[in-house]
Amino acid sequence: MCRSSTALAKPPSRMSFMCIFISCRAIWAMSRMCAGAPTRNGWRNMTRCCEICLSLPHNSPFHSATGAPMNQPIIQDMINTILDGMHRPHLTETCDTVKTGDPTRRVTLVVTTFLATHAVIEKAAALGANFIITHEPTFYTHHDSVDWLAEDSVYKAKRKLIDDSGIVIWRLHDHIHMRQPDGIVLGLVQALGWEACMQNGEPHYCVLPPITLAELCAQIKERLGIRHIRLVGDLDAEISKVVLPVGAAGGGLHYQLMKAYQPDVIVCGELNEWETSEYIRDANQQGQRKAILAIGHANSEEPGMAWLAQWLRGVYPDLTINHIPAEDPFVVV
């Protein structure tokens, strides 16, 4: 199951320790000059100096104007590094753009998430993050156009939260899906524990040990920590071959995967109810034991953004990088 990591306080920088060392040596020297040995006041001043150095103000020479240490990467440079690691050349027609904030600032703490909801942004701000990487739109349309929201109260409240926190929100959708293998699907396969079941390193297609459809549903719910699954198919049917078109891939990709792999079951995020689910229903009415599981868009792609956080920790070992799940918004009554 995808879990958010715990934010750990960063230790004082090497520059802070240098400041402490130099200042303490200076006080020691002055104490010896004045009295031949450190006095009680000398020790007190030395202690106070160390306290000051460990809590250097954000506008000190050792920090950038944003409060991030000067050795932290610029957000835009980090974006470029991520894009290089996902897909080259970079796409020119893409929704993977900065949605809010100033990407020329230095990174303090990074948060990855499936979707930058109001609650996710609040949690990120509380952690001290100034960079959120989201997979899906922040403002409810594919390209985050906001003209239609100018006087909307929900938009204005969310925008105020973002502006007040100074958080940069960047969307990473197209490039991570075009990575080989697809980072979002790979994250789901890892969360399900199916890596050994991938065929030819392709996470879209897994061959499992034979299992009933009911057992598969129980396994997915347990390993992803999700509450419900919608399905078309026979729960008693034995299955093995699984394809995973995550998110809202659409009937076209569903059919391509079915044609290529002849799977027993499709595990998708969401679907148009008049497309693949009706194809599967007809197949069952004709005597073919096929199934489709709709586990929810967020549930199918959140593990991929947790995978991204882990990938980033390998690239930036000195940065604190957290994953905050957006969580499935739906309940079943």
Image: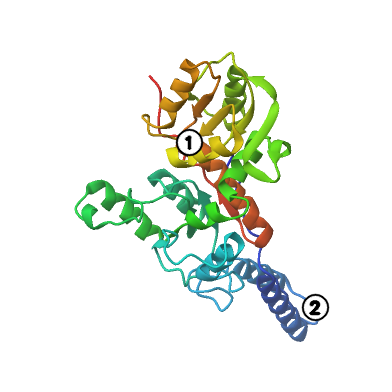
Residue at the far left in the pictured view: 151
- Residue 43 position, x and y percent, is 72, 70
- Residue 236 position, x and y percent, is 59, 13
Task: Identify the disc placed on residue 99.
Answer: none
Residue, disc 1 = 269
In the displayed structure, does residue 38 sit left or right of residue 130?
Answer: right
Residue, disc 2 = 37
Residue at the far front in the pictured view: 286
Q: Which residue occupies the foreground of this view, 114 or 12?
A: 114
Quarter location, residue 288: top right
How crowded pointer 2 is (Cα within 10 Å; few <14, some 14-19, many 20+) is rated as few
Q: Disc 2 marks which amino acid?
A: Ala
Residue at (61% x, 32% y) in the render: 242
Residue 249 visible, this angle: no
- Residue 207 position, x and y percent, is 68, 32
Q: Which residue occupies the foreground of this view, 200 or 301?
A: 200
Q: Disc 1 marks which amino acid?
A: Gly
Q: Which residue occupies the foreground of this view, 93 or 66?
A: 93
Residue 320 visible, this angle: yes
Q: CA distance from mark 1 to mark 2?
A: 72 Å
In the displayed structure, does residue 275 sit left or right of residue 150?
Answer: right
Looking at the image, is mark 1 or mark 2 earlier in the sequence?
2
Q: Are marks 1 and 2 in contact (CB under 8 Å)?
A: no
Element type where label 2 sits in the image: loop
Quarter location, residue 237: top right
- Residue 259 position, x and y percent, is 55, 37
Element type where label 1 sits in the image: loop
